[in-house]
Structure formats: C-alpha cells, structure tokens
Amino acid sequence: MERGLSSSDRVLVICTPEYVRKANEGKGGVGFEKNILTAALLKDANDNSIIPVVRSASSANLVPTFLVSKVYVDFRDDALFESGYGELIRDLHGEASRPRPPLGSNPFKRIEAAIDPVVSFGSERYVSPDMEGIVTFDFSNNNGCFTFGAGDTAFETMWTSAGNNSIHAYRDRPSIRSVALVTSSREIKDIQDAKIFDSSSRYRTPCAGEILVWKNTAGYYLATKILSVRVRVPGHSFDEVRVEYKIAPLKSACFSGGST
C-alpha cells in the first residue's frame, strides 16, 4: 500500500460513508492509508495528486477530515454521471490547468428576423428555443406537442384538453423523463429543488396558476406555469394554453438563481 501510494502520479480516494468513518477514526488499513496521504499533503499543501471521489453519502461529511481542503468529484447522482466522469477525465489529463478559451457566441440567443406578416401552419409554430419566456399555442394541433428549449435543453412536451381552466400534460415524448406537479410554490422563481416533487405518474393535470416541473433525458429541468387555458366553444374556435416557462441552466434543480 505504501509503495503504491507513494509511486502513483494520481490517487483517487473513493469516499463512501464507511471509508469516511474509518478514515476519521484512523481504523485498519484505511487509517494507515490516511496517514500516508496526510504525510504527502503536509509535505506539499498545494499537491493536487489526490482526488476525492464522492459516490454516496449518508451524512454531512462527504469526505474525510484530512481531505476537506480538496475539490471532490461528485458521482452521487446517476443522472449526472457523464458530467462527473468528464470532469474527472479532464482533471486526470490536466485539462483543468489550461487557459479557458474566449467566450463564443450564445447558441441560445435568438435574433428576431423581420418576416412577412403571413400565418404559418407548420410545426415551427410549436417550438420556443429560448431558455425562458411566455408562449401561447393551440394544444389541439401538432399532435398536442410543444417543444421548449433546443439541443440538450429540449423538452418535447405533450398536452391534451382536460376541460376549461385545466389541461393534461404527459411525459410520453422521447426527450421527457418525468413530469411532476408543484404543490408548494406559486411562482417559478420560488422553486428551490425540483427533485422533491412526485414524478411517478405518466401525466399531470394542472389548473391555471399551477406549475409543472419536467426533467428531460439529458438531465435538465423545465418549469412551466399555466397562465390560462381556453377550450373550443362557440365564439372561440380553437383550444389555447398560455404558459410561462424557464429551463434551469447547468442541469440545476433550482429556479431561484442558485443551484442544488
């Protein structure tokens, strides 16, 4: 163990709850390993050869006390595995030490172009690539589908009529992993953790003023607030829903500006 640790260029410390407990108590082989790694850290406080990897946690202590000053790689959420794996690979190959390239153009910023005032009945009427906004669409057309976002942040939502002032929302489209009804917030900005809401059902039926949170297969979260629902009746010739929406950046489950 001593030869292996001292001769390695990089050391991955897999921090399970049991490993953290044994390291803090200095027990057994883990305690001996801790002493070797602590000596290396005391020799060079800026040593970055030791990389904590957090796979699971059952307490506030994600890493042992002797590693609290080190930046860890988070593998607790299986849905974000690829992101954590990419971060680890970049670190092992020294990519993190390279200068950040200049910021390019924003791929999500839509530039409105002047168009002729004609009515389009194509599927492009049922797409809003921006990260947030307010949209109105006829949910009886385009097979009830409306897409929010683009690329990895795309959400192919699906809707059907549920009567005046309410609407059915489904998770049936390929890009959607789950949909849940928000029960504790009246505004999108008040949602602190989208993961706490029950997403076990195939569909939800929000009324006007209520919010849904969606998760797509890429791991992003979308919040949609139903502003109004109108169904086809004499004097109103089409079904219509008006929706305020926001896609949380960086796969965050928080819509108030922070991250979870």
Image (cartoon, rainbow, N blue to C red):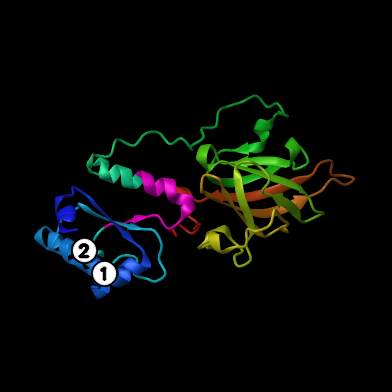
Q: Do the residues labelled 1 and 2 touch (CB within 8 Å)?
A: yes
Q: Can you identify the residue that label 1 sits on?
A: 23
Task: Write the residue at 57% across / 58% down.
Answer: 188
Mark 2 lies on a secondary structure that is helix
Q: Residue 91: x and y, percent?
A: 27, 45
- Badge 2 amino acid: Glu
Q: Is residue 131 left or right of residue 15?
A: right
- Which quarter of the image is occupied by the N terminus? bottom left
Q: Is residue 12 above or below residue 36?
A: above
Q: Nearer the viewer, residue 149 or 165?
A: 149
Q: What stretch is highlighted in magenta?
A: 71-86
Mark 1 lies on a secondary structure that is helix
Q: Residue 248: x and y, percent?
A: 50, 51
Q: Residue 217: x and y, percent?
A: 55, 45
Q: Mark 2 packing: few (<14 Cα in 10 Å), some, or many (20+)?
A: some
User: What label does residue 33 carry, if any?
Assistant: 2
